[in-house]
Amino acid sequence: MPWTAVFQIGVGYGLVLSVVFTTAVLAGVLTARDFMAHRYPPAIRDRYGERSARGKRVANWAGLLVGVATVAVFAGAVATLRARVGGDVGYGTAFAVVAVVMQTFNLYDLVVLDWLIVVVARPGFLVLPGTEGMPEYRDMRFHVRGFAIGIVLSFAVAAVAALVTVLLQALL
């Protein structure tokens, strides 16, 4: 397996996915401040209450956008890897490159979005009305638990994406 290529391509496409996700989150928050309220710590969700209908619609559209972008990023990563190795990639190689993409995104989400922006900077547009000053905004354990779940989900997603890659290569 071309480990250097897998790592370089995976990290590069993982950063692309991170930028797409960050853009979707920023656009979503600017459109409906509560669109990600369901992803906040439980105490904040309890105090804030239900998301608005607009917040739910924006979350659906942002989720669709990020989902489509994720598939495109996976396809781009595998296509780039195929070009670099000069032919089809096996299950293990496809799994590895998608896993690196996902782990790069997962780490970016924890360090940049969760830790630096939400916990440290905590801009006002991310604080839900009525929850100002709640200590749960600084709860790093909540974000680390999400990161740990992301590790497991990343490997599950990579397994499925690698299977799809191998099947598509066999058909085309």
Image (spheres, rainbow, N blue to C red):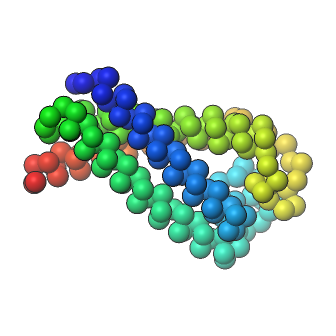
- Left or right: residue 143 compared with residue 47: left
Q: Residue at x 25, y 36 (%)?
A: 81
Q: Residue 137 location in percent, x, y? A: 79, 45
Q: How many marks?
A: 0
Residue lying farthest to the bottom in this orientation: 53
Q: Residue 145 location in percent, x, y? A: 61, 37
The relative height of residue 51 versus residue 117 in the rendered view (above or below) is: below
The image quarter containing residue 101 is top left
Quarter placement of the C terminus: bottom left
Res. 90 in view: no
Q: Nearer the viewer, residue 77 or 159?
A: 77
- Left or right: residue 153 compared with residue 135: left
- Left or right: residue 168 compared with residue 152: left
Res. 6 in view: yes
Quarter placement of the N terminus: top left
Q: Residue 6 location in percent, x, y? A: 31, 30
Residue lying farthest to the left in this orientation: 171
The relative height of residue 125 versus residue 139 in the rendered view (above or below) is: below
The image quarter containing residue 39 is bottom right
The relative height of residue 16 versus residue 25 in the rendered view (above or below) is: above
Q: Residue at x 56, y 37 (%)?
A: 108
Q: Residue at x 66, y 75 (%)?
A: 54
Q: Nearer the viewer, residue 27 or 156?
A: 27
The relative height of residue 32 versus residue 9 in the rendered view (above or below) is: below
Q: Nearer the viewer, residue 134 or 113?
A: 113
Q: Residue at x 29, y 23 (%)?
A: 3
Q: Residue 56 location in percent, x, y? A: 62, 71
